[in-house]
Amino acid sequence: MTEITRSSRRLPPWARSWEALLCLALVVEIAVLGAINPAFLNFENLLFSTSDFAHVIIAAIGLTLVIITGGIDISGVSVMGLASIVLGLGFVAGVPIGGAMVLALLAGALAGALNGVVVANTDVNPLVITLATLFLFSGIATGLPTLLDFLGFSAYNSGGFEAYQYEGITGLPKVFTWLGTGSLGWVPLPLIITVLVALTASWLLRATRFGRFLYFIGDSVNVARFSGVPVRRVLVAVYTLNGVTAAIAGLLLTAYFTSARSDLGSEALLNIITAVVLGGTSIQGGSGSVLGTTLAGLVLGYLRQGLLSLGITSDVIPVIIGGLLAGSVVLKITLEKRRSTRANRAAYEAGRSAIETRIG
C-alpha cells in the first residue's frame, strides 16, 4: 500500500467528499482570478456579484430534488418568465404587490404540478414531457397579455395588457425591487434568499420522509413502489416544488432588473443543469446534495464573472461551461469507479484474511 493511499484513508470522510473538492475548486478559482485581476478579490464585490447568478442556484436547487428521483425538468426557465409576467400583469391590473407575488408563486406551483402529474401517470420520458411544457409555458407567458384583454380584464393604462406583450413592465414598487437590489448590512438580499432556499431544501432531503422517498425512487422506482412509497404523490410534489423554486428565481430576477418580462431567465438552462451535475447529483438518480449544487453554482457564477472581467466575450463563456460540464461528468465517473474498485479490493482482502485465519 502506498504512502499516498495511507494518507488519503486517514482523511475524515467529509474531506474525501465531492463537496470538499468543490470547496477547494472554489478557493483556487477565486485565488487564480484574483491573481490575474486583483480587483476581483474585493470582498464586497464578491458578495454582491452573487446577485447576478442567485437565480441560477435557486432554480438548480429545485432541479436537484427532481433529478435525485431519476427525472428531469427543463421547463424551469420558462416558469421563471411566466412567474415574472404574472407578477407584472397582476400589478398593472391593480393587485397589491404582495398579492401579485402570491399569484406568481401559484403559477409556478401549477406549472410544476402539471409536469408532475404527467410524469407520474405516463411512461413518457420526463425530458420529452418538460421539453413540451418548456414551449407551452413560454407561449403562455408571451400570449397572456392578449388573453387577458380578450377576457375583458382591465389594466391601468389605456393600451390594455397587450401593450406589455413584448415590453418589460416597469414601475414596480421599491419594496419589491429591494429584494433583488437591497442588502442587510454587507450581505445582499438575493444571497440571503438563496441560503434560505438551500437550507430549506437540505432539511427536506436530510430530515424528512419526503427526502428519503426521493432517494428511494431514484434508486429504483419499482422497489420504492413495492415498499409502500406513494410514488405518484411524491413525484407530483417534487415537480411542484421545482416549479415554486423556479418561480422564486423568476421573481428574484424580476426584482434585480426592476422589470417584469416573459423571457427572463431563458438563457439560464445550461448554467442550471451544469450546477446540478457539477454539484455531484447523479443524472440517473439516487444520489445528490443541495450543498453540492450550491457550491457548484458559486463556482460557475464566479467563473463567469471572472471571465467577463478578463474581457472574454459572453459568446465564448457557454463553450467553457459546456466543457466544464463534460469534464465534471468524466471526473465523477472516474472517481466512482476508483471507489468501487477500492471497495471490492477491501472486500476481497477481508475475505481472504478470514479464510487464512480459519485455515491457520
Image (tube, rainbow, N blue to C red):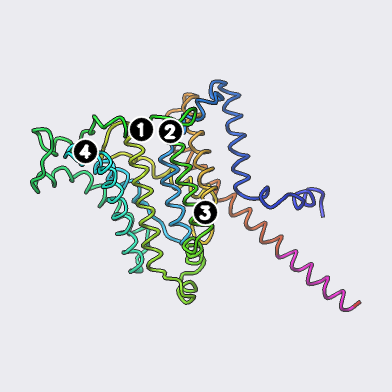
Q: Mark 4 or mark 2: which is in front?
A: 4
Q: Is residue 337 left or right of residue 259?
A: right
Residue type at mark 1 is Tyr
Secondary structure at badge 3 equals loop
Q: Earlier in the sequence, mark 4 or mark 2?
A: 2
Q: Which residue is mark 1?
A: 256
Residue depicted at 18% across the width and 45% down the height: 143
Q: Is residue 150 left or right of residue 165?
A: left
Question: What kind of secondary structure does the magenta stretch mostly adopt?
Answer: helix
Secondary structure at badge 1 equals helix
Q: Which residue is mark 3?
A: 281
Marks 3 and 4 close (CB-CB < 8 Å): no
Marks 1 and 4 close (CB-CB < 8 Å): no
Residue 227: percent from left, percent from top = 49, 75
Marks 4 and 2 close (CB-CB < 8 Å): no
Residue type at mark 2 is Ser
Residue depicted at 50% across the width and 38% down the height: 300
Q: Which residue is mark 2?
A: 51
**Residue 319, above or below 183:** below
Q: Which residue is mark 4?
A: 91
**Is residue 358 or residue 151 the one in the foreground?**
151
Residue 236: percent from left, percent from top = 36, 62
Marks 1 and 2 close (CB-CB < 8 Å): yes
Q: Earlier in the sequence, mark 3 or mark 1?
A: 1
Q: Which mark is residue 38?
A: none
